[in-house]
């Protein structure tokens, strides 16, 4: 190995500075994650330790590599260890840069897909270094690159410095283990993962084999179904209020640590409510898919996340049920219906009315997240629509609210305040209920109020202790109006059960398997299995069964398997999940894209 012209002390110092840079990068990433996620969720101080704990594993690894680079007798070994350390620092720093620039993580498949577009990527880089702050970042990046190059060059053995690195490896390892005891149970937990963990193989990206799917479809087709029809049907008007982020933990009635929904709780006591109702997904789009398409929002094989395009169906949907029963179907929201293509999807499902932020009713009103007016104005818009529509035809209307979307801005004060925002949302639900009741709507009509998903906030320790893994999916469900059903429903139900329940109420024949329930009736029929698509672990689907039992299904193509104790009919449940995921992908492949 040829000797370098750089002074040997400088080379040893470069190794130490490179190691120190990793610590600085980790601290900076923790600060950025805390600023983003803490501000978004209103959970300040929740993300620093978990993020540092994840990167502490890399610090421990880098410390061991630095120790080898200082102690190994063979120059080649010392250089190899230094180069691995430099690679660790470089990847972590690049991940930080991507996160700072795009609020995304450094993912290998994204690099392979987008890295070839040099012109576009360079335009982003040059734009990011504009201004004083950008030039400072550029100077730091250049200095870091120089340090990393110097750190790769051969340097003499440094036993004393090795002691420092050895002690650092021990401290970092202990801290990383300690952080493991303080997990952040959060739907976007990958924000805290280090750059190595976030690039580990993703099981949901693996495709199913043809032979495997043939076996799974045969098993699903052999499953018994219950086909039923209500002999005493009704055709009431139905309003489904899908309230953004409304969660069971907000409700004192449902045993939540907070008591932010006193009006909704009072409405529940006067009418009908569920003690165990669950969201099928972890995002608003997941709730929309479960309610509008009557489907669990699975991520199809080969995809990182589900899209609306995976759930374009002609039959079995809410609009399809409405058409068959003589109802008009409507979807109203004060938000931007062009966001992630929801408006196009709703039209492809054939909702008769799709009404969003561009409606003239909202002109002159202040706009908030997603260009939406506050809930008060939105409910006024619905009441105006109710007054001006053709009253001779019954309707089913979904009202998707926006005010309580993170970062939880109370429109009365403009302040970010989760409690005040949810109390406002609760009061407006109460006002809508009072108005409909005063008009006589509830004498013949039905009003459902539920959450689209549990808040995208970390689970509190008490919440997790009380409900375990099911806490990720608990949302309120209140039914008011002209419906014959028990006052309190203790059995578990889910969002995807709404369409089968309405089908029973309307007297339409609907066939159900073990994964679908029906509750708008005197004898609610719960599903045998409730399914929740996890957000904190995207490779996992939970199946709720029995009295509080949870089985996790690890997605991994043909090798998908159960985590822990599987449900009693594990093979059938696995086949049902596999088939529905595969169907979602096939729908995307078979459906032409919407016209521009």
Image (cartoon, rainbow, N blue to C red):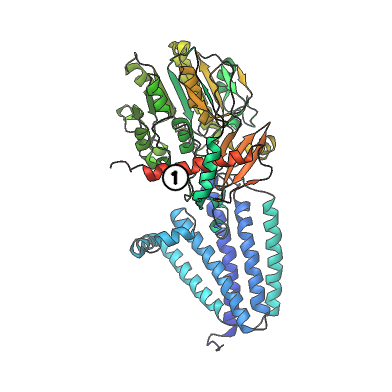
Instruction: Tell me if 245 is positioned left or right of 359 in this view.
Output: right
Position in image of residue 51 (x %, y %): 60, 54
- Quarter-of-image position of residue 237: top left
Instruction: Name the element at disc 1.
Output: helix
How many other residues sit within 10 Å of disc 1, few (<14), some (14-19) or many (≥20)? many
| 135 vs 447, nearest the viewer | 447
Q: Residue at x 46, y 59 (%)?
A: 109
Instruction: Tell me if 512 is positioned left or right of 549 in this view.
Output: left
What is the tally of numbered marks visible in this picture?
Answer: 1
Classify the position of the C terminus by image quarter: top left
**Above or below — where is 302 with respect to 26?**
above
Residue position for label 1: 585
| 502 vs 37, nearest the viewer | 502
Position in image of residue 436 (x %, y %): 45, 15
Q: Could you tell me if residue 345 is visible in this image?
A: yes
| 67 vs 271, nearest the viewer | 271
Q: Residue at x 69, y 34 (%)?
A: 466
Position in image of residue 175 (x %, y %): 69, 58
**Above or below — where is 586 with respect to 86?**
above
Q: Residue furthest left?
A: 596
Position in image of residue 420 (x %, y %): 53, 31
Classify the position of the N terminus by image quarter: bottom right
- Quarter-of-image position of residue 389: top left
Q: Could you tell me if residue 41 is visible in this image?
A: no
């Amino acid at each position: 190995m040829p000797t370098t012209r750089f002074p040997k002390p400088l080379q040893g110092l470069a190794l130490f500075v490179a190691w120190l840079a990793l610590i600085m990068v980790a601290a900076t990433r923790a600060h950025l994650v805390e600023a983003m996620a803490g501000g978004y969720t209103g959970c300040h101080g929740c993300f620093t330790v978990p993020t540092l704990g994840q990167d502490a594993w890399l610090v421990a690894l880098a410390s061991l590599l630095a120790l080898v680079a200082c102690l190994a007798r063979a120059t080649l070994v010392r250089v190899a260890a230094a180069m691995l350390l430099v690679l660790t620092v470089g990847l972590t720093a690049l991940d930080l840069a991507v996160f700072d620039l795009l609020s995304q993580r450094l993912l290998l498949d994204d690099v392979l897909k987008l890295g070839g577009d040099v012109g576009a990527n360079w335009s982003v880089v040059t734009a990011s270094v504009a201004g004083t702050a950008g030039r400072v970042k550029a100077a730091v990046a250049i200095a870091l690159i120089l340090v990393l190059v110097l750190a790769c060059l051969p340097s003499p053995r440094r036993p004393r410095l090795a002691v420092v690195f050895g002690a650092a490896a021990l401290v970092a390892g202990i801290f990383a283990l300690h952080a493991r005891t303080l997990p952040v149970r959060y739907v976007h937990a990958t924000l805290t993962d280090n750059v190595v963990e976030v690039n580990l193989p993703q099981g949901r990206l693996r495709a199913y084999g043809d032979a495997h799917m043939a076996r799974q479809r045969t098993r699903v087709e052999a499953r018994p179904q219950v086909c039923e029809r209500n002999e005493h049907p009704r055709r009431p008007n139905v309003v489904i209020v899908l309230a953004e982020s409304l969660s069971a933990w907000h409700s004192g009635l449902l045993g939540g640590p907070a008591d932010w929904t006193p009006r909704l709780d009072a409405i529940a006591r006067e009418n009908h409510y569920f003690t165990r109702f669950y969201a099928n997904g972890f995002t608003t789009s997941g709730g929309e898919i479960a309610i509008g398409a009557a489907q669990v929002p699975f991520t199809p094989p080969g995809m990182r996340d589900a899209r609306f395009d995976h759930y374009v169906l002609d039959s079995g949907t809410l609009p399809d049920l409405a058409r068959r029963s003589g109802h008009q179907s409507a979807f109203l929201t004060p938000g931007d219906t062009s966001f992630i293509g929801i408006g196009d999807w709703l039209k492809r499902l054939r909702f008769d009315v799709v009404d969003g932020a561009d409606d003239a009713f909202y002109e002159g009103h202040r706009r908030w997240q997603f260009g939406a007016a506050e809930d008060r104005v939105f409910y006024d818009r619905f009441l105006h629509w109710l007054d001006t529509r053709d009253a001779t035809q019954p309707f089913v209307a979904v009202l998707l609210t926006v005010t309580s979307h993170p970062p939880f801005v109370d429109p009365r004060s403009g302040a970010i305040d989760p409690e005040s925002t949810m109390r406002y949302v609760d009061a407006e639900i109460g006002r809508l209920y009072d108005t409909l009741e005063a008009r006589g709507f509830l004498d013949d009509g039905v009003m459902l109020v539920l959450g689209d998903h549990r808040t995208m906030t970390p689970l509190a320790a008490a919440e997790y202790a009380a409900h375990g893994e099911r806490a990720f999916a608990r949302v309120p469900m209140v039914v008011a109006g002209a419906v014959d059903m028990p006052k309190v429903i203790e059995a578990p139900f889910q969002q995807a059960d709404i369409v089968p329940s309405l089908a029973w109420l309307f007297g339409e024949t609907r066939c159900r398997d073990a994964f679908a329930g029906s509750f708008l009736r005197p004898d609610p029929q719960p599903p045998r299995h409730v399914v929740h698509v996890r957000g904190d672990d995207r490779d996992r689907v939970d199946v709720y069964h029995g009295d509080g039992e949870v089985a996790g299904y690890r997605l991994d193509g043909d090798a998908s398997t159960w985590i822990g104790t599987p449900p009693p009919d594990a093979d059938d449940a696995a086949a049902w999940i596999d088939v529905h995921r595969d169907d979602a992908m096939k729908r995307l492949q078979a459906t032409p894209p919407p016209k521009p």
